[in-house]
């Protein structure tokens, strides 16, 4: 990985406080994940008011700063994140952030992201996922590999591709084998009673596959 993407590791953690076990706070869950080795967090939580999201972004920046981590915010951006993550239908920002990512699900969306100069994309769902049941169908390793090979534009620009959707410690390495630059994980960590342990398992699986 080069350029702005040099700051991104092989594991992206996406937040979703609706999946947390009862009584757990999102900041506490992310803190545990950071202790487990997470170094890049994408803040979703689109239903929060701007003031609440800005406060959350501030708190998570404070968690990531001591470990040199990266914080990306899903549009609409609030606070002072390191980057911006766009949904499939979001227009590109007028002012480019330091790091730009986009959610993709098929070849045309990958081509658009490459043409926009996105640094990375999430490609989903790669497997059946409890976070979004019925969302799919799952790409599977073969289709994922095919799409990843075609992720660049006519000028050879290619965003890094992160596998998302149904990624777990027992299959994380499969997506690297299929051509992924990394994996993006939400439910497996958000639903865990020990988020740090799950992150450690994910990182171990990625290290073995690499």
Image (cartoon, rainbow, N blue to C red):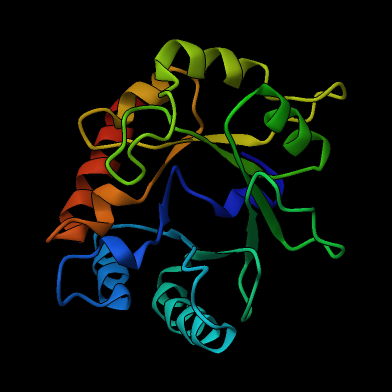
Q: Residue at x 41, y 25 (%)?
A: 176
Residue 86 position (above or below residue 78):
above
Question: Which part of the image, by quadrant, shows the C terminus?
Answer: top left
Q: Residue at x 62, y 16 (%)?
A: 149
Question: Which part of the image, by quadrant, shows the N terminus?
Answer: top right
Choose top left, top right, bottom left or bottom right for residue 92: bottom right
Q: Residue at x 21, y 59 (%)?
A: 195
Relative image position of residue 105 (x, y in whole percent): 57, 31
Q: Nearer the viewer, residue 142 or 197?
A: 142
Relative image position of residue 27 (x, y in whole percent): 32, 77
Residue 12 position (above or below residue 163):
below
Residue 78 seen in this snapshot: yes
Q: Residue at x 43, y 83 (%)?
A: 59
Relative image position of residue 22 (x, y in whole percent): 15, 71
Choose top left, top right, bottom left or bottom right for residue 63: bottom left
Relative image position of residue 132 (x, y in whole percent): 36, 43
Residue 12 position (above or below residue 127):
below
Q: How many marks?
A: 0
Residue 207 seen in this snapshot: no
């Amino acid at each position: 990985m080069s350029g702005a993407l040099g700051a991104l590791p092989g594991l992206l953690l996406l937040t979703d406080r609706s999946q947390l076990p009862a009584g757990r706070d999102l900041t506490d869950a992310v803190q545990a994940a950071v202790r487990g080795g997470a170094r890049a967090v994408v803040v979703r939580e689109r239903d929060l008011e701007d003031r609440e999201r800005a406060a959350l972004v501030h708190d998570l920046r404070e968690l990531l700063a001591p470990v040199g981590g990266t914080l990306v915010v899903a549009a609409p951006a609030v606070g002072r994140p390191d980057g911006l993550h766009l949904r499939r239908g979001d227009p590109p920002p007028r002012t480019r952030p330091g790091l730009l990512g986009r959610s993709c699900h098929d070849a045309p969306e990958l081509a658009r992201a490459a043409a926009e100069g996105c640094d990375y994309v999430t490609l989903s769902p790669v497997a059946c996922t409890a976070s979004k049941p019925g969302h799919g169908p799952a790409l599977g390793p073969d289709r994922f590999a095919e799409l990843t090979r075609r992720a660049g534009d006519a000028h050879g620009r290619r965003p890094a591709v992160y596998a998302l959707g149904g990624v777990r410690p027992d299959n994380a390495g499969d997506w690297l084998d299929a051509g992924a630059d990394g994996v993006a994980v939400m439910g497996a960590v958000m639903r865990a009673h020990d988020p740090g342990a799950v992150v450690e398992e994910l990182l171990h699986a990625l290290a073995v596959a690499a």
